[in-house]
Amino acid sequence: MNITYTKIDNDNGDAPLFSREEIAGFLYEHLGQYRDQKKAILKCIGYAYGDKPGQNGFILVAHQDLNISGVVIINQTNMGDYIPENILVYIAVDENKRGMGIGKELMKRAIKLSDGDIALHVEPDNPARYLYEKIGFSSKYLEMRLKKQ
């Protein structure tokens, strides 16, 4: 299988290979039960592209020609020294191409492309957790959230 990995860090210059809608649609479909609403995914993409001051990051797309096989989105926190400089917000691989090493390769490349440490959130029952642990992620903290109505 011939997979190409393309980094996209904004869509203001040359037209990217994949539109925001295509990337969001892919993630929405292939994140399955762990997905967010498409609106939230598009907001994350905008953050990675630097739509507002202080926002930046990048998207890494695994693809065969113009068919997306996998996507990872890294947002920069701009808070180095007290929390990790980056957060891996989304990663998904086409459900028909899982187990072929695409997710692992996306992770390795995203780590290499990122300046500084990376944090991510994963639900305890998500099988992707084992990939993250194999690559070197650990759970140093217990995350707690207050959900305001």
Image (spheres, rainbow, N blue to C red):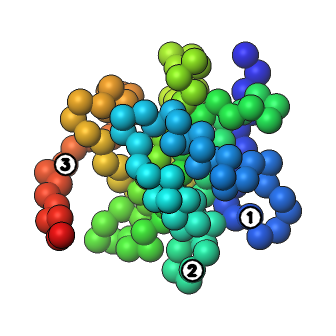
How many numbered discs sit on the rendered protein?
Answer: 3
Give the CA distance from mark 3 to mark 2: 31 Å
Amino acid type at mark 1: Asp
Give the labeled residue for mark 1.
11
Question: Seen in the image, is 73 located left or right of residue 63?
Answer: left
Residue found farthest to the right:
14
Residue 22 placement (x, y as % from top left): 68, 46
Give the labeled residue for mark 3.
140
Classify the position of the C terminus by image quarter.
bottom left
Crowdedness of circle 3 by 10 Å Cα count: few (<14), some, many (20+)? few
Of labels 1 and 2, earlier in sequence is 1
Crowdedness of circle 2 by 10 Å Cα count: few (<14), some, many (20+)? few
Q: Secondary structure at mark 3?
A: loop
Give the labeled residue for mark 2.
52
**80 or 99: nearer the viewer:** 99
Identify the residue at image location x=17%, y=70%. 148
Classify the position of the N terminus by image quarter.
top right
